[in-house]
Amino acid sequence: MGTDHGTELKTLRPEEFDRWWDHLIRAFGGGTTSTEERELDRSLTEFDRSLAVWDGDTLVGTSGAFSFRMTVPGGAVVPTAGVTMVSVAATHRRRGVLTSMMRRLLEDARAKGEPLAALFASEPAIYGRFGYGAATLQLDAEIDTGRVTLALPAGTDEVRVRYAPPADVLAECEAVYAALVPRRPGMLARQPGWERAALVDPESEREGASALQCVVAERDGGVTGYARFRTKMGWGPSGHDGTVTVEDLAALDPATEAALWRFLFGIDLMTTLKVRGRPVDDAWQHLVSDIRRCLPQLRDAGYVRLVDVGAALSARTYLTPVDVVFEVEDAFCPWNAGRWRLTGDAKGASCERTADAADLALTVRELGAAYLGGVSLLSLAAAGRVRELRPGALTEASVGFGSAVAPWLPHGF
């Protein structure tokens, strides 16, 4: 497949993987990667969904997609293209390389019957023009555990926390994660092989911290949660000044979650707890004695794009009844453009083409941002990105599109 500027887009062949990978690493700063990382990514790469753009014999662009399933409001787990590995050579900017890859990936997702696409953006300014909206936020924090205490819920003392080698309890941890997937929009049902990604632990990426450590929480005879973390020893004028960095934490009930946080707060010689990439409604915020000393920060995380407007809006449920006609603009995927009538409630929904007058006008990017329930249509309208054409329609749709829990994409891809 040719592009507009003389390059050629092809499906990646297995024998081209190392060259493809090396191009990607150079585009992301040229750092070193371990053999373990390379081989894991090779094993996870879906070659029929991975693209290489060539200028003669020179590789100038990479991209691909993973076949994921994402939880949407209501608990359904919907086929989703996880767009990934996107890079363009610095020598070939503004020559249509990225556009050709983005179009092909979305066309392929449509052909596979995937109503959604999702990605993490290395540069947020890039992907809006391809219809992706910032749909989830993540919470980071740096907690002064010497001054911040925890108020623990009933049952916390019934939970046993024990150390375990991460690989030895991988199956138990994955069972906890799988049980949580239907509870929160944005979570990904892991495909076989993806469980190994959490255990990749090259020394070159530890920044002086320990190897990955793990504890599991047990209650009533079973594993009900886990935490993966690193420690880094430090010393200052007043003594020990170590840091714990949380890589992953999951729990099936409040007591288990509190027990895991209590353990992380109490590791000897550590005075700072770094929390990265957590859901914005994470429970620890309501356990701590002083939220200011936790230095919470929000940043953009997952971006969502509706590949098929009708199928995507039909797949989720709505907090309150909605009956609204959207006028959707989608220049990049013209099959989505036009008017769609959405009717639905907490039990189910349908979204079909219509000739009825529009109630709200917006682009597919705004639908992607609002789709998981973490961004309100009212806030987008306040920014001039949604236009209300029927009085009352905006509030109706905005409330209906909400989610009882904050959406969260728990890990990159």
Image (spheres, rainbow, N blue to C red):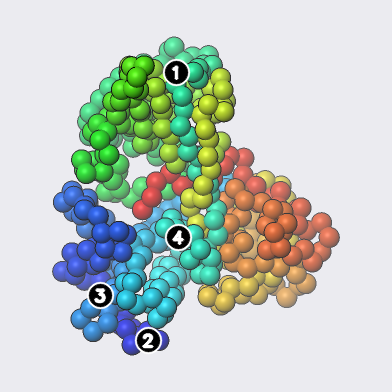
Question: Which quadrant of the figure has residue 383?
Answer: bottom right
Cα distance between the residues tagged 1 and 3? 52 Å
Q: Give the side of residue 97 with respect to residue 302, left or right.
A: left
Q: Is residue 358 visible?
A: yes
Read off the residue under disc 1. 146
Q: Nearer the viewer, residue 145 or 282?
A: 145
| Residue with the mark numbered 3 | 59
Sequence order check: which comes first, mark 4 or mark 1?
4
Residue visible at 40% across and 62% down? 83
- First reached walking from the N terminus: tag 3 or tag 4: 3
| Residue 346 x %, y % | 65, 46
Residue 292 position (above or below residue 268) = below
Q: Which residue is rendered at x = 16% and y = 69% of the image?
A: 15
Disc 3/disc 4 C-alpha distance (Å): 22 Å
Q: Earlier in the sequence, mark 2 or mark 1?
A: 2
Q: Of all residues shown, which one is farthest toward the top?
A: 157
Classify 10 Å Cα crowding around label 4: few (below 14), some (14-19), many (20 and above): few
Disc 1 residue crowd, few under 14, some 14–19, many 20+, Cα 10 Å = some
Q: Give the residue pinned by disc 4.
A: 123
Residue located 25% across and 75% down the image: 59
The residue at the point 18 percent across, 53 percent down is 39
Q: Amino acid type of disc 3?
A: Leu
Q: Are marks 4 and 1 in contact (CB under 8 Å)?
A: no
Image position of 181 with respect to 269: above or below:
below
Q: Is residue 112 left or right of residue 359?
A: left
Dot 3 or dot 2: first in sequence order is 2
| Residue at which label 2 appears | 5
- The earlier-in-sequence mark between 2 and 4 is 2
SS category of the residue bearing label 3: strand
Q: Position of residue 387 (x, y in %)?
A: 74, 65
